[in-house]
Image (spheres, rainbow, N blue to C red):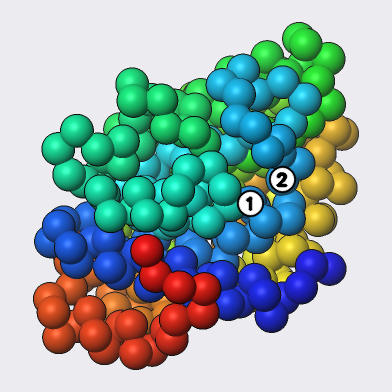
Amino acid sequence: MPNIKELKDLTTQVRRDILRMVHKVNSGHPGGSLGCAEFFVALYQDIMERKDDFQMDGHDEDLFFLSNGHISPVFYSVLARSGYFPVDELNTFRLIDSRLQGHPTTHEGLPGIRVASGSLGQGMSVAIGAAETKKLNKDKHFIYSLHGDGELQEGQNWEAIMYAAGNKIDNLISTIDVNGQQIDGATHNVLPLGDLRAKFEAFGWAVVEIENGNDLEAIFNGMAEAKSLAGKGKPVCVLLQTIMGNGVDFMMHTHAWHGKAPNDEQLEVGLSQNPETLGDY
């Protein structure tokens, strides 16, 4: 098990980055970003086997694809603090001509970004294509992906989910951020998703549930289980139960902060609840 104290400190700093980035430009998506901070930190600091030198082809390393690209603030923060690009570049979030656009893009060649994302429902298909490429190249590494629960309302997901099982894409570990919130309200009010475990199993996937997706040790244990199920003929789904806005009390358990930036006073409250650990950019 990695050093949980150090990773908790990093997670706190990532939350500060998210709040400051979105506040500076009065634009962005803090809610889902805050809720997935532990997951990204765990993934990039320990779970994935990755190279120090970013190469777009991704040979001989694990790859990650973000499908719900609007939570780019957490992605950018963790990439920067994992050494992909300078931390002070976070100052350019959502500015004209910045490499850090609201949804990740590839045209500016940002290290760590392998696909433009944010058109919801498409990331599963991309991840499956990458996983099939690994198989064709006899590369034993894994493909990881992240999707929002509300995003599963897009039909393309289910075609891809069916395809992955039918073609035994068993080097794929797809995580669903199950926070129960989306831009227009709670998912059960907008379009109920039903029993996601039963759905994925019915489509032929192996399923792992992480009941506290904001606890690092629970994430490490759950993802270890997911890796143990991979390579056995089925793609693997991880249902990660998170709290939208986690770590900032007035943002938690509500869709209101899905795509809303904090004002000056709210920023200070959020930062006070997440004391500086590694230094701001």
Relative to residue 24, is residue 267 depicted above or below? Answer: below
Task: Name the spot of residue 247 as percent of width and height, x first.
Answer: 42, 80
Relative to residue 195, is residue 200 depicted above or below? Answer: above
Q: Which residue is mark 2?
A: 48
Task: Name the spot of residue 220 as percent of width and height, x first.
Answer: 74, 63
Q: What is the CA distance from the residue labelled 2 to the residue labelled 1? A: 6 Å
Amino acid carrying label 2: it is: Met
Q: Quadrant of residue 135?
A: top right
Crowd around label 2: few <14 · some 14–19 · many ≥20 (10 Å):
some
Amino acid carrying label 1: it is: Tyr
Label 2: element kind: loop
| CB contact under 8 Å: marks 2 and 1 | yes
Of 152 and 230, the residue lying toward us: 230
Q: Is residue 72 visible?
A: yes
Q: Residue at x 39, y 44 (%)?
A: 68
Which corner quadrant holds the C terminus?
bottom left
Crowd around label 1: few <14 · some 14–19 · many ≥20 (10 Å):
some
Q: Which residue is mark 1?
A: 44
Of 111 and 11, the residue lying toward us: 111
Q: Residue at x 48, y 62 (%)?
A: 36
Label 1: element kind: helix
Q: In this image, 84 relative to 121: left or right? A: right
